[in-house]
Image (cartoon, rainbow, N blue to C red):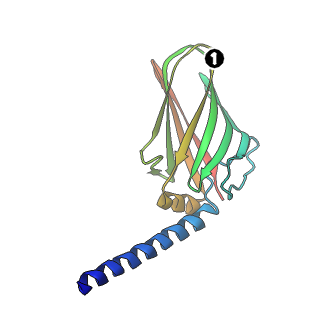
Amino acid sequence: MEKYFMIILVMLILLAGLTIIKDEMLRQSSADVSFFNQTKDNKSEKMTNISTKPVCTNCNSVNLSRFSIEITKIVQDSMLSRIVTAKIRAKEDVRDLTAHIQLYVGSERIKVNDMDEIEVYIGNMKAGDEVEKEIRISIDVFSAMKVRQNGQVDLLLTLSFDGGQEEIKIPVKVG
């Protein structure tokens, strides 16, 4: 009986130690991990405090041949996640529009929300129509450490629609 008690006690101590190590890694990585931190004039903002206040407003605008995209707000949701609000304006009629979002550190794709990419269905748009979407983007602690070490994350945005697609890679500096 004592043998089982000792084994359980050792397991609890190990579990507590691993929890403390994980919490410390999250705390250290959250200080500089801010992946979506460009303002319209490319000045960097540091996002270190967890809050529901916007960390960026009118953050980034991109013009493509058929669309214009404006990231209007980024809110820090937790240490490793952000809620991003963006507007997409169609310059011509498109059907079945879907946005695909991928993140890369160098040539290595990192998981977003535990998936290879985020897919957001937007639907049909007429020329001049504008749609605003809000998505939560999260990465794991090991990916956050890679982003921090590299100093930059590349956001690959692909807009797929009936009859074609447009793609843009946006480098985002961190830290």
Does 124 appear above or below 138? above
Which of 170/5 is in front? 5
Pinpoint residue 117: horizontal percent, then vertical percent. 45, 41
Pinpoint residue 45: horizontal percent, then vertical percent. 73, 52
Does 154 appear above or below 63? below
Looking at the rendered image, the quarter that the N terminus falls into is bottom left
Which of 42/20 is in front? 20
Packing grade of label 1 (10 A; few <14, some 14-19, many >=20) is: few
Query: To which residue does mark 1 refer?
Result: 129
Which of 86/151 is in front? 86
Q: Residue furthest bottom?
A: 2
Q: Amino acid at mark 1?
A: Asp
Residue shown at 55% from the left, 42% from the top: 136
Residue shown at 53% from the left, 58% from the top: 144
Pinpoint residue 7: horizontal percent, then vertical percent. 29, 81
Looking at the rendered image, the quarter that the C terminus falls into is bottom right
Question: Would residue 112 appear left or right of 152 to someone viewing this image?
Answer: left
Pinpoint residue 167: horizontal percent, then vertical percent. 53, 33
Q: Label 1: state its secondary structure.
A: loop
Question: Would residue 159 appear left or right of 12 to someone viewing this image?
Answer: right
